[in-house]
């Protein structure tokens, strides 16, 4: 079992920044890739970013590339999503997720464990 707890969401003006954190516990953190996905009401959950077990590779959706940066600190069992130049369309509930069994990191179905989500609201 893996437990994931997100933090860092909130309200920010367009152009501002937020940093989301996700603390993991349970199975060995370095065994799995980590991702962030987001969801707005009435829409499907969508991929935002993912990172390899050792941080050597990162993956981003086109909509956040160049503005968001994903990193991990394996000593702290934590991943961080730095979000800069935020736009109103970034408003969503952001979920941290763990990919243990080599599923498709770009799809919600590829993740095995999920956090409870943290709300991000970007005002115009």
Image (spheres, rainbow, N blue to C red):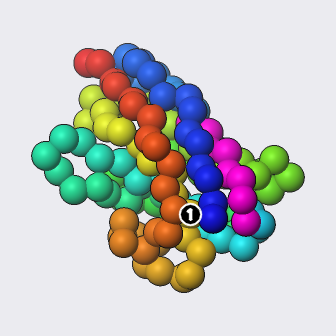
- 86 relative position to 123: left or right: right
Q: In this view, does 111 lie above or below 49?
A: below
The residue most toward the front is 1
Indicate the position of residue 27 as horizontal and vertical percent values: 73, 65
The residue most toward the right is 75
Indicate the position of residue 44 as horizontal and vertical percent values: 22, 56
Q: Residue at x 34, y 25 (%)?
A: 121
Quarter of the image that includes the N terminus: bottom right
The span picked out in magenta is 20-27
Q: Which residue is drawn at 49% across and 56% down?
A: 114
**For residue 75: magenta?**
no
Indicate the position of residue 37 as horizontal and vertical percent values: 41, 53
Q: In this view, does 82 lie above or below 50?
A: above
Dot 1, crowdedness within 10 Å: few (<14), some or many (≥20)?
Answer: many
The residue most toward the left is 42
Classify mark 1: helix, strand or loop: strand
Indicate the position of residue 50 as horizontal and vertical percent values: 53, 62
Quarter of the image that includes the C terminus: top left
Which residue is denoted by mark 1 in the rendering? 98
Q: Would residue 94 be visible to someone looking at this image? A: yes
């Amino acid at each position: 079992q893996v437990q994931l707890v997100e933090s860092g969401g909130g309200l920010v003006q367009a152009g501002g920044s937020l940093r989301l954190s996700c603390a993991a516990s349970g199975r060995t953190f370095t065994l799995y890739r980590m991702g962030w996905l987001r969801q707005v009401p009435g829409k499907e959950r969508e991929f935002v970013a993912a990172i390899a077990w050792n941080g050597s590779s990162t993956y981003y959706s086109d909509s956040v590339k160049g503005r968001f940066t994903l990193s991990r600190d394996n000593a702290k069992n934590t991943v961080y999503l730095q979000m800069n130049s935020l736009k109103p369309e970034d408003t969503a509930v952001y979920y941290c997720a763990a990919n243990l069994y080599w599923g498709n990191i770009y799809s919600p179905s590829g993740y095995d464990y999920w956090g409870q989500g943290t709300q991000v609201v970007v005002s115009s």
